[in-house]
Image (cartoon, rainbow, N blue to C red):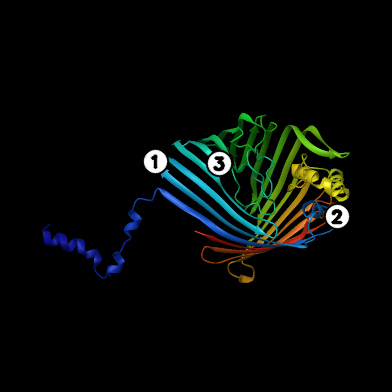
Amino acid sequence: MTRLAAILFLALPSLGHTADDFSFDLSAYAEPSPFELHGHVEWRQEHQRLDTDSPLYRLNFADSDRDTLNRSVAALELTGTYRSGDSRLTATWHGERLHDDLADNGAGRFYELYLAHQADATTTVEVGKRAVKWGKGYAWNPVGFIERPKDPNDPELAREGFVIAGADFIHSRGGDLHTIAFTPVLLPVTSQVNDDFGPEHTLNAAAKLYLLYRDIDIDLLWLSEGSRPGRVGIDFSTNLGANLELHGEYAYINDHEQKVLDTGAMITRTYNAHSWLLGLRYLTERETTWIVEYYHDDRGYTQDQMEYFLTQVDSAPAAALPQLRSVGQAGYTRPSAMQDYLYLRIAQKEPFDLLYFTPALTAIHNVNDGSWSLTPELLYTGIDDLELRLRATLLDGDRLSEFGAKPNDSRFELRLRYSF
């Protein structure tokens, strides 16, 4: 073939095409950047209507006669990842500035800061501050042995991790048992490292064994006795239908110690405890998501124990309130402080063809004393990278019940979050 013929042959495919047909993006062939950064900035405005007759109002606002509380919160969360070969360094930093009618303060800390190295296709090693997430529950995780508890009223919020050394070993195979994965973890506790995990202990050991059997996800979990009592657990999730998922968790805690206020003094009860959760998640054809969970925890207080504490707060002289405040912080005033709860969340994507709107309703019912919280919300995502959420939380119950005794009977919140 002559040089002219070769030129004509190469030019033939271009006949009838414009220059635009052959444009291409050089960036598609560029080497990806080893560094990634993303995050969000957030502003939140809250208005609380206080219940001046409740026991916990007296505990928290004894020197005040206010009936409302306004609060502003500004937050910044950044996550960066640097990759080099088979290793990556990941950091998540979270900072907040809070201002309300009583306080003005701010703080920032790393939620995560860890190094991960993938030795081969089946083995990964991680060292550093890591937010481990164990369990299948949405609002609670009885088997979350080495993580901070969720806020059941906002369980998708990011949480701070602990300093650990861990690894993942994954093996895939044929047959009914598709995948096996083993995750051992070491968690030290000293006066400077993980000091809020429990009493000082050189190394706490934990492990998770993951099994994918047919279409059932199963985890077997363990935490050694050390800074916390030893415990074992199991969780599972499986699809009962195309849009229906069943999940559950169970944990057995050995020699749990519970601090209880009895006859005016704090005593410690030691016993073996059971904690479990059973839930369903269902997505309808109209994109309505239903989440239902029942949660039981032997480590929680009974109705009589909670009523006794609240009665003491009600009748104590003002000088005794600081001590009772410390008693409350030891357990009585923490979220989900009692034994049995029923959780329901309903979220509807774009109802009546209202684009970018997702209304939702969350209800938490304390089965022991009959009190409840109800949180309707509206989420709008129609502006690029901006999320607007409006929600209200309403509390009700007898005066000496968990939700009825809260210092507020309602809270309204507007949140603006810009992601980048």
Of the image marks 1 and 3, the number of the one nearer the N terminus:
1
Residue 404 in percent (x, y) is at 82, 55
Residue beneath disc 3: 130
Placement of the N terminus among the 4 image quadrants: bottom left
Residue type, numbered disc 2: Arg
Q: Quadrant of residue 5?
A: bottom left
In three-dimensional space, the C-alpha distance between marks 2 and 3, rounded to whole angstroms, equals 41 Å
User: Horizontal and vertical percent for residue 304?
Assistant: 87, 44
The amino acid sitting under disc 3 is: Arg
Q: How many residues crowd mark 1 within 10 Å: few (<14), some (14–19), many (20+)?
A: few
**What element does badge 1 sit on?**
loop
Which badge, 1 or 2, is on the more N-terminal residue? Answer: 1
Q: CA distance from mark 1 to mark 2?
A: 60 Å
Left or right of 373, for residue 86: left
Depth-wise, is mark 2 or mark 3 nearer the camera? 2
Residue at figure coordinates x 57%, y 59% from the top left: 42
* Residue closer to the observer: 169 or 226: 226
Residue where numbered disc 2 is placed: 399
Mark 2 residue element: loop
Task: Please name the residue shown 86% across and 55% down the image.
Answer: 399
SS of the residue at dot 3?
A: strand
The vertical placement of 315 against 10, above or below, is above
Which residue lies under the disc numbered 1? 85
Q: Nearer the viewer, mark 1 or mark 2?
A: 2
Neighbours of disc 3 within 10 Å: few (<14), some (14-19), many (20+): many
The residue at 31%/58% (across/down) is: 26
Q: Position of residue 382 (x, y in %)?
A: 55, 68
